[in-house]
Amino acid sequence: MEQDLQELAGLVYQRASAVETTFARLRARDFPTHQFEDLAKFPQLVAREVRKKIPSWLDLASDPRVQTASVKRMLQRYGQALEFVHQSLDFVVNVEVLSIPAPFVLFLQELGSEFMETSFVLQAAPLFNYSFRRVAPTLNRPLLQAGLSPRLAENFAVFRFPAALREDGLQHCVLVHELGHYLDTGELLYSDAWDDAGPAVRERIERFIGTEMGIVRKGVEQGLQTALFRALTSWVIETVCDVFAARVLGPAYLFSSIEFVRFRPDLTKGSDTHPPSATRLWIIHKEVQSLGWGPDLARVQHEISEPPHWSYAALRTLGQQERHLRILERCLQELLPAIRRVVRRRVGANACKRGSYLAQERRIVEVLACCVPPGELGLDGDVISPRDILNAAWFFHLGGYQGWPEVPGSQLDQAFQKRQLLSRLVFKALEISFVVRHWPATRKTGRRTK
Amino acid sequence: MTVVGRERLVELLSDDTPVPERLVVTPILEPDIQIGDGCIDIRLGNCFVVTKSARVGGIEPFKRPTPTELERYQETLYVGFTQALWIHPGTFVLGGTLEYIRLPSNLYADVTARSSWARLGLSIACAVAVHPGFYGCLTLELVNNGNTPVAVHPGDRIGQLTVYEAEPAARPERKPSGKYQGQIIPSYSSLHKESSERERWKALGRALRFAPKQ
């Protein structure tokens, strides 16, 4: 047998063993949900299978009828597959910090499961940003090519949140937008919105973008059209997710978004992927208002402004970059009614209406004012739903923590301490609400629930 | 002080009692089992703090540990409801209660181990007093005094809270900045916040050393 084939096999075997050991160590941690366990176990399964298969390939190579090159190719594929699964380490590290927002994970999974079968994990990342990534396709493809059997669930995704803000239960409401991405990736709601818009709207959009083609240099026309359509698709997806989050979470999503975009100047103007912040906030505000929350939104009214409705003549006076953004904005406005219709249909009765919250509001606020997590209202009292908890917490924060005693320290210090305490109460309330709602069901199974 | 009986406990815990006067122990998943005559069973939460002594020389209680020192000294573990935490003989572990507790200004409470656990060698609290006005999850100091490892699970009814009627406190509302107020997971000792008192003793010692002999 060729010397370099032996060396290649040895190298792949060594890598497989190293990957297996690394992930075995990670699995020693206790994870809040079984999805982490699945993600950490997956590379181990791959590495084990590679190690098991290498000897049989070497046996095959010793057969003079078999071409060594094909065996080498296979071993190289194993090596590449290991490279890909090794990358999943990036998703698994930093999950131990979830010991604090674990109740938030439960909330998201519960909320997500109202709409679809969910399989995702949350990862703390060193960025002040929230993002969504479906990881299964990237990880499964090289395995399929290498003929290896382990697969990660096709809908497996990773939601990233800022590591430094892990204890901020209020800010994490933004994660419901990422849940919207999860839903949209599976169901292509943006495409439904496009269909639902009807031929007249589609024609107007095409004319708008098509007219833009006429005023730019020849040769880039096709590319520009594609680029604008691609950007419009991204904007529609973002808007679908915003409308979804606004509908299922109500004002808490609006408030957390206002806070979030303050620190993201890159989002202010709009980009190829995201509409301008002001437009997004206006859309979210409009959606939350439609659920009856109008009277509660007065305190953030100054943050909301309706985007201008550009005519084509007015657009001609702008520079190219600005003009493109405005064209996209105008197209989005055309599509907005369809987006809202599609999301409304999908969310259905799960919308966060003000009426149901109002029935509990006074009692939730009383509990919060006494520094008690509003998960349930006393012995045999009502259990509070997670979104009522989050909305109440936001109202309490914006209302200046009415009823809480003053603490020593500067104004900034006080505000920081109060927000920290409120966040802790939110996490505890979410946990209490979850445990109390699911406890009766455990009686039937006679088992502990995860 | 008198121990509060079952009937009164249920009344105090009820949502009919105005919140400021209410005894809050939430969640109570099995009221019939958990609320006894004069006490309420409390459960273990999911978070534990275990110490890693190999990288620290010792504890200086009045010195505020930096986040790095804390990281070297202790580790917070999240243990799921299906998992166990083994406490080995002589080991010290901080655990938190699943229940969030708030005492109004006229109630005082003691936290002690349930005798079934104590018989296995497990003690759960050295600092048993819960003062009027406290709010938060209790931190339990778990020590295995026996000679066999003991497994505990989050959700286990491990301790009990005995509640007493007390004179209303002069300062009924404890501040949110209070040392352990509002905690939801076990936390490190905050003795360093009292370090000024030790400084005064040191100053006194220095003054005595230089005082002229009589």
Image (cartoon, coloured by chain):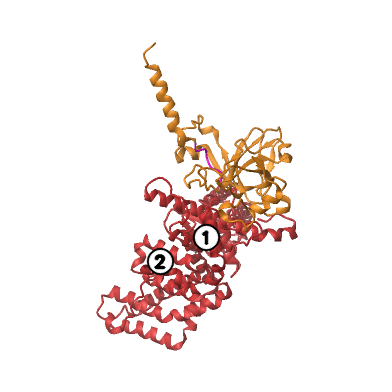
Does residue B18 show up magenta in the picture?
A: no
A268, above or below B152, in the image: below
- For the question of whether residue B123 can be seen, the reply is yes
In this rendering, the count of numbered labels is: 2
Element at label 1: helix
Q: CA gap, disc 1 to disc 2?
A: 18 Å
| Rendered-image quadrant of the C terminus of chain A | bottom right
Q: Position of residue A369 (x, y in %)?
A: 51, 55
Occupied quadrant, residue A45: bottom right
Does residue B187 show up magenta in the picture? yes
Closest to the camera, between mark 1 and mark 2, is 1
Between residue A45 and residue A398, name the one nearer to us. Answer: A398
Q: Which chain is orange?
A: B
Which of the 4 image quarters holds residue A445?
bottom right
Residue at screen point 26% across, 77% down: A318
Task: Say above or below: A311 vs A301.
Answer: below
Q: Nearer the viewer, residue B152 or A418?
A: A418
- Which residue has dot 1 on it? A365
Residue B96 tag number:
none
Q: Amino acid at mark 1?
A: Val
The image position of residue A259, as x and y in percent, is 41, 61
Identified by mark 2, the residue type is: Arg
Q: What is the letter of the red chain?
A: A
The residue segment tinted magenta is: B185-190
Above-or-below relation of B66 to A184: above
Q: Where is residue A338 drawn, in percent x and y?
A: 47, 81
**Secondary structure of residue under mark 2:** helix
Host chain of mark 2: A
Disc 2 target residue: A299
Parent chain of label 1: A
Label 2 crowd (10 A; few <14 / some 14-19 / many >=20): few
